[in-house]
């Protein structure tokens, strides 16, 4: 992983004429001590910040802070880093710089809805990286075969043929699917995970958002944190299920109430829960969750809490 990040980022800095010491970059990108990375994240040297952003050991809370950088190569490192929270990846997907979007397209943790967004927003280089991402579903590759860029068209067609040749249009036989579904219905976690991913990404089976939601919700009800986030999102956007902001809010509350997940993930959910309660004029509960968000380091939660305390001072007694 480290070699891949070093090679790609340094290559792009050289190609685009960005001045940076590759030796310094390579030194910093290999650091494993979080305390050192925290200290280096406050550096005023561009190559140091780029390396901290690309370092696979950099924790989420540092990556979140680095998104305030005006250096596009710092943002590119954040976009590619496996530890970057999904809400930050979504924020970066709104950038117009193709050099940033390219690294977002390369990140294997970038969710499907962002990959689909990059088909419309990205340039040829971003689309090329999309084609190379093993998690890019067949449906996206098919769209790219009709791209206006003939190189992108050709690459997408080759990748599509390769996918079909290597795995066929259906990896699972009907019998295998039947066994998996029975196990999933009986509560088998691994079977639920396999089916949720298969139907969501269209890998090995025909993509089916309704079935993806069904098995993802099973996992969420078993307490799987990532699946709980996914179900909250699916209710919000109407992916495989009818849009339901009430259900979305209920799942954000479930996540926020957990104390066994990363602080920033909990904080983000708490911020969302706070919005939900304000929509129904439950100021007391909004205060509770925005305070939780602030206590766990979410800047938006902190700002919301300050505004609430101005508008409703009686809820903010120290």
Image (tube, rainbow, N blue to C red):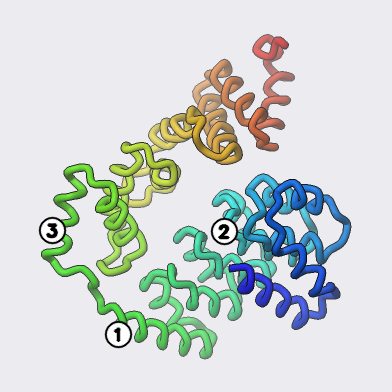
Answer with left or right where residue 107 lies relative to residue 145.
Answer: right
Q: Secondary structure at mark 3?
A: helix
Q: How many marks?
A: 3
- The answer to whether residue 69 is seen in the rendering is yes
Answer with left or right where residue 164 lies relative to residue 119.
Answer: left
Look at mark 1 in the image and give the residue it sits on: 165
The answer to which image quadrant residue 219 occupies is: top left
The local crowd at label 3, few if under 14, some if 14 to 19, many if 20 or more residues have their Cα within 10 Å, is few
The local crowd at label 2, few if under 14, some if 14 to 19, many if 20 or more residues have their Cα within 10 Å, is many
Look at mark 2 in the image and give the residue it sits on: 82
Look at mark 3 in the image and give the residue it sits on: 178
Q: Earlier in the sequence, mark 1 or mark 2?
A: 2
Give the residue drawn at x 45%, y 78%: 144
Q: Secondary structure at mark 1?
A: helix
The answer to which image quadrant residue 8 occupies is: bottom right
Q: Position of residue 272 (x, y in %)?
A: 54, 35
Query: Gap between marks 2 and 3, in whole Å?
Result: 34 Å
């Amino acid at each position: 992983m480290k070699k891949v990040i070093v090679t790609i980022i340094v290559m792009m800095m050289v190609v685009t004429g960005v001045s940076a010491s590759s030796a310094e970059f390579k030194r910093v990108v290999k650091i494993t001590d979080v305390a050192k990375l925290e200290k280096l994240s406050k550096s005023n040297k561009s190559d140091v910040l780029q390396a901290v952003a690309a370092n696979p050991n950099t924790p989420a809370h540092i990556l979140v802070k680095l998104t305030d950088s005006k250096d596009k190569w710092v943002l590119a490192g954040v976009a590619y880093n496996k530890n970057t929270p999904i809400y930050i990846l979504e924020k970066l997907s709104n950038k117009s710089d193709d050099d940033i979007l390219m690294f977002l397209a390369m990140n294997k943790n970038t969710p499907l809805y962002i990959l689909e967004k990059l088909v419309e927003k990205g340039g040829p280089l971003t689309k090329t990286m999309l084609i190379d991402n093993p998690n890019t579903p067949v449906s996206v590759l098919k769209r790219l075969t009709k791209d206006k860029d003939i190189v992108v068209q050709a690459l997408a067609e080759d990748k599509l043929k390769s996918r079909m040749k290597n795995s066929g249009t259906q990896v699972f036989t009907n019998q295998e699917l039947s066994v998996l579904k029975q196990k999933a219905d009986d509560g088998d976690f691994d079977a639920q995970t396999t089916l949720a991913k298969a139907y969501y990404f269209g890998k090995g089976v025909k993509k089916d958002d309704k079935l993806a939601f069904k098995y993802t919700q099973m996992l969420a009800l078993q307490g799987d944190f990532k699946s709980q986030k996914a179900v909250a999102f699916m209710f919000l956007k109407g992916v495989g299920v009818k849009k339901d902001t009430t259900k979305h809010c209920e799942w954000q509350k479930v996540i926020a109430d957990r104390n066994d997940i990363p602080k920033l993930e909990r904080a983000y959910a708490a911020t969302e829960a706070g919005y939900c309660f304000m929509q129904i004029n439950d100021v007391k509960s909004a205060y509770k969750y925005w305070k939780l968000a602030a206590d766990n380091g979410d800047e938006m939660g902190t700002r919301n809490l300050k505004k609430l305390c101005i508008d409703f001072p009686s809820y903010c007694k120290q």
